[in-house]
Image (cartoon, rainbow, N blue to C red):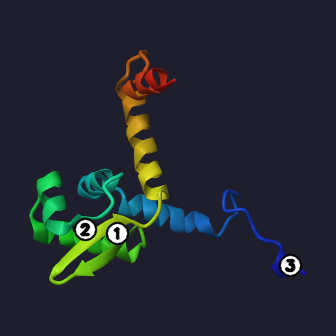
């Protein structure tokens, strides 16, 4: 009977808490955050193009992408010798966006941060 009962991942005693901590650890790198920001809304991007965007060598970007791929944050498609990367789903993108927004709050000094201005303009 308990097999039909699924635990909410947002419960404090969820088995996903430790995995979430691993995701935070993986994202605790500026190059990986920049890669995720570069992949947002871009569809598929080659390693060389990502390297240009984040201003790192293709070899360094490939190493970061390998870690993101092992964590299933990005996925790949190969076309001949070229490999294209894309975000696996919207969650890593949202997590990075929320972290950036929190950082904006940290330096806003009592003023509404930039993302609040953007929200008002869209309304």
The residue positioned farthest toward the top in the image shown: 111
- According to the picture, the residue beneath numbered tag 3 turns out to be 2
* Crowd class of label 1 (few under 14; some 14 to 19; many from 20; radius 10 Å): many
In the image shown, does 48 or 43 lie closer to the viewer? Answer: 43
Classify residue 52 as left or right of residue 118.
left
**Which label's residue is closer to the chain start, 1 or 3?**
3
* Crowd class of label 2 (few under 14; some 14 to 19; many from 20; radius 10 Å): some
Q: Residue at x 29, y 56 (%)?
A: 29
Q: In the image, which disc is placed on residue 50?
A: none
Q: CA distance from mark 1 to mark 2?
A: 6 Å
The residue positioned farthest toward the bottom in the image shown: 80
* Crowd class of label 3 (few under 14; some 14 to 19; many from 20; radius 10 Å): few
Q: CA distance from mark 3 to mark 2?
A: 40 Å
**Contact (Cβ within 8 Å) of mark 3 with mark 2:** no
Q: In the image, which disc is placed on residue 64?
A: 2
- Residue 72 image offset from top left, x and y in percent: 43, 72
Classify residue 22 as left or right of residue 37.
right
Under tag 3, what secondary structure?
helix
Q: CA distance from mark 1 to mark 3?
A: 34 Å
> Against 57, is 54 above or below?
above
**Contact (Cβ within 8 Å) of mark 1 with mark 2:** yes
Q: In the image, which disc is placed on residue 68?
A: 1
Classify residue 76 as left or right of residue 94.
left
> Against 102, is 88 above or below?
below
């Amino acid at each position: 009977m308990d097999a039909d009962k699924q635990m909410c991942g947002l419960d404090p005693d969820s088995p996903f808490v430790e995995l979430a901590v691993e995701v935070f650890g993986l994202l605790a790198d500026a190059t990986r955050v920049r890669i995720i920001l570069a992949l947002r809304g871009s569809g598929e991007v080659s390693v060389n193009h990502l390297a240009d965007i984040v201003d790192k060598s293709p070899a360094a970007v490939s190493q970061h992408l390998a870690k993101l791929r092992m964590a299933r944050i990005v996925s790949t498609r190969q076309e001949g010798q070229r490999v294209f990367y894309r975000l696996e789903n919207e969650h890593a993108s949202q997590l990075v966006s929320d972290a950036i927004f929190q950082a904006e709050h940290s330096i806003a000094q009592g003023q509404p941060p930039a993302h609040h201005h953007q929200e008002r303009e869209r309304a």
